[in-house]
Image (cartoon, rainbow, N blue to C red):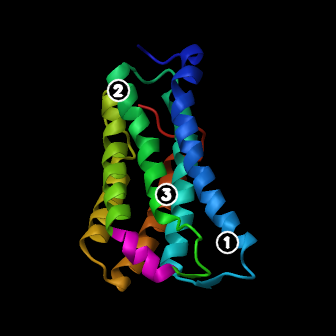
Amino acid sequence: MPVDAASFVFIIALAGVVNGLGIVRWLTGFTEYIRRRSSLSIEPYWVFALAACFQFLLHTLFWWSLWGMRGNATINFLSYLYLLSGPILLYVATALLMPNVEDDEIDLRAYYFSVRPGYSTILILLWLWAIFSSPLLRGEFAPTAPIFSIFLVNAVVMRATANPVVHGVSAIINWVLFAAVIGLFFLQMGGPTT
């Protein structure tokens, strides 16, 4: 069925809730660090900080881009399940990336590299999902597909190596690509439509 304005809110509600859970997970972790800052010893790691902030921005980009679906997508139950898999992947990536504050010490570099295989695997799946969302929901690739493909290659590189220099470069590449996709496609609510 085509997604009209009346059905849009109903269809998107669950995707929005799941996406919101990821944002809540991110904010809860951040708030816990602030709350325990006097008793918590944090060994900072700039790559982790860039990845964590990037993850938060991915949640907001997903929410912002949902608006472009109204009136332009065709939804059935299977495509709806596919649509839901995006925010689920975002949530899982955020939950993996944000450490639980259980001890009084956190080495964010060691933590980042301990979750790197799982986190980067989820990013690979997320970028594959993003690339193929438009063809499945709208019938053709979105103009964002080339940039999302570069994100995908970057995630594959992150998965393939634990080299800290490579991860630093990958984190910077993610931010540059994010700025490019926002500047080129998502300054207006909903982003590109086909």
Residue sitting at x 75%, y 82%:
38
The residue stretch that appears in magenta? 108-116
Decide if residue 1 is on the left or right side of residue 128. right
How many residues crowd mark 1 within 10 Å: few (<14), some (14–19), many (20+)? some
Q: Which residue is mark 2?
A: 79
**Mark 3: which amino acid?**
Ala
Estimate the spatial distance between the alpha carbons at disc 3 and disc 1, rounded to whole Å: 15 Å
Residue 160 falls in image quadrant: bottom left
How many residues crowd mark 3 within 10 Å: few (<14), some (14–19), many (20+)? some
**Mark 2: which amino acid?**
Ser
Q: Which residue is mark 3?
A: 95
Picture coordinates of residue 16, whole percent (x, y): 56, 36
Residue sitting at x 40%, y 21%:
75
Q: Nearer the viewer, mark 3 or mark 2?
A: 3
Q: Which residue is mark 1?
A: 33
Element assignment for label 2: helix
Q: Does residue 150 show up?
A: yes
Residue sitting at x 37%, y 39%:
142
